Image (tube, rainbow, N blue to C red):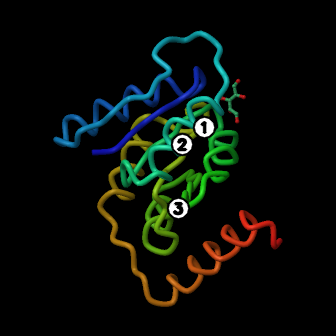
Amino acid sequence: MLVIGSDHGGLELKEAVKDSLTSRGIAVEDYGTDNGDSVDYPDFAEKVAGAVSSGDVALGILVCGTGIGMSIAANKFPGVRAALATDEFMAQMAKQHNNANILVLGGRVLSVDLAIKMVNVWLDTAYEGGRHQQRLDKISKVEDAVRAGKL
Ligand code: RB5
């Protein structure tokens, strides 16, 4: 199961990605938005990144116009590694090297076809661990220090 969310700028792509995942047999919980009215992307980043951060769900996808706002907002949540990707290589590396638990897409940047390929490669790629884990551990240490007011 994964969770997905977008603002109005990412709505169309979110719907297409959701349909593609569902047709792959992957359960998707959609946290909105569900119409084209102008909304604030942090509200949807909060829902998806909050669910991943709390451990309620392992993976999420966020879509806004460029993906930039969603990335900034999602990465405020402890334990969230939200990766903004614009091609299949970045989507693959986001998992393989960064173990990204949220993939962020730009609805005004990507074609539906490319975005679906990116989502599939991100889901189908394994995290490599090893030397990459020590780097993720350093990020976690920074997160802990900031939370403790030590940085
Ligand atoms: C909304 O117009 C747009 O600013 C938003 O979707 C996103 O691109 C922000 O980063």
Query: Image quadrant for the N terminus?
Result: top left
18 left or right of 90? left
Snapshot quadrant of residue 129 = bottom left
Q: Amino acid at mark 3?
A: Met
Q: Nearer the viewer, mark 1 or mark 2?
A: 2
Query: Image quadrant for the C terminus?
Result: bottom right
Where does label 1 land, which residue?
Answer: 109
Q: Amino acid at mark 2?
A: Leu
10 left or right of 24? right
Q: Amino acid at mark 1?
A: Val
Where does label 3 land, which residue?
Answer: 90
Q: Secondary structure at mark 1?
A: loop
80 left or right of 92? right
Where does label 2 land, which residue?
Answer: 105
Alpha-carbon span between mark 2 and mark 3: 11 Å
Residues marked 1 and 2 touching at CB (< 8 Å): yes
Q: At 67% from the left edge and 67% from the top edge, which residue is drawn?
A: 143
* Residue 144 percent across, percent down from the top left: 66, 70
Mark earlier in primary sequence (3, 1): 3
Q: Residue furthest front?
A: 148
Give neighbour class at mark 1: few <14, some 14-19, many 20+ (Cα, 10 Å).
some
* Residue 125 percent across, percent down from the top left: 34, 66
Give neighbour class at mark 3: few <14, some 14-19, many 20+ (Cα, 10 Å).
some
